[in-house]
Image (cartoon, rainbow, N blue to C red):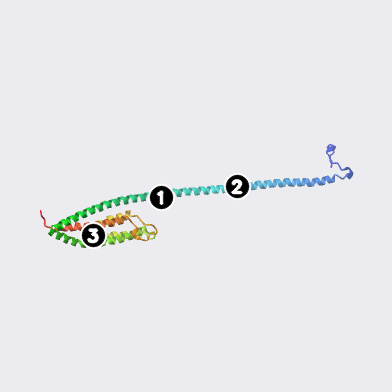
Amino acid sequence: MNNLNDPPGWNIRPVPHEGPDGGKWNYALLVPMLGLAAFRWIWTRESQRQIQEAKNQFEGDVATVAKDLELKYKDTLTENRRTTAFLELELEKARQRVEGYKKALASQSQHLLVERKQLHKEREELEEEKKRAVQSGAAGLVLHAALQQEEEWQQRAQVLLQDLEHRLVERQNAFCSLLLPRERRMEMEKDLLLRVAKDPAGAELGLEDDIRDVFKNDRHCADMMNMDKRKNGKLMWLYLKYWRLQVTLQKHKRAEDRLKGSLPDVN
């Protein structure tokens, strides 16, 4: 097994006291060591390959998950921004409607207040005229009779206003209700306008336009826990007060017209 071409110092020589076959033990130890080294080299190489494959697989999975999360987060963020923009727009529209209603209600309230003061003033003037007419003797008797005759008209007008008040309360309750359909409210409004149109007092007082104004602008509703229907609405209550004053004033105007037609012409 020795290479004769190599220098003597490089050859494996037998142990002198074991005879010429002592080198077999050296080879017997060398073969397992070489096999173990080869096994370790192969095992280490295979392990490194598997580790690299696992690492590549892990990095690929992480990249895929990260990409999916990024797309999902981006879509969610876009949808949230779109929803937020829509809600902000709706909120601004609602705020503008509320502001418009407040301005309209304030303007209407101011208008009704001015008319109410004017009615009070005219009523006081009529009272003064009535006193002067009563003091004039025969004219006072005629005025009293005229007022008595107009009492029936006033009672009919008051009955009409009581019916209108009940109908308006029910209509406003239907407007504020989340359960009653819109068609039911529209039917109630139609019946209410028909009721006013058929009554002579309603036409004489000009109630139809006022009621249409209530339908258009009175959007006040009490809180959700409210059980009292009469707490709904604001504009309609102002109109009801105005109508009652108007009935009283109209009674005196009708009596005055009747009086002027009954008294002889003094000119």
Q: Earlier in the sequence, mark 2 or mark 1?
A: 2
Residue 82 placement, left or right of 240? right
User: Is residue 187 in view?
Assistant: no
Whether residues under marks 1 and 3 lie with C-beta atoms below 8 angstroms apart, the answer is no
Question: Crowding near pointer 3: few (<14 within 10 Å), some, many (20+)?
Answer: many
> Which residue is label 2 attached to?
60
Query: In the displayed structure, would residue 52 be above or below residue 185?
Result: above
Alpha carbon distance from label 2 to label 1: 46 Å
| Foreground residue among 47 and 142 | 142
Residue at 67%, 46% (x, y): give it.
Answer: 49
Dot 1: what SS? Answer: helix
Three-letter code, disc 2? Gly
Alpha carbon distance from label 1 to label 3: 44 Å
Image mark for residue 91: 1
| Foreground residue among 125 and 175 | 125
Residue at 26%, 57% (x, y): give it.
Answer: 243
Image mark for residue 201: 3
Single out the mark in the foreground, 2 or 1. 1
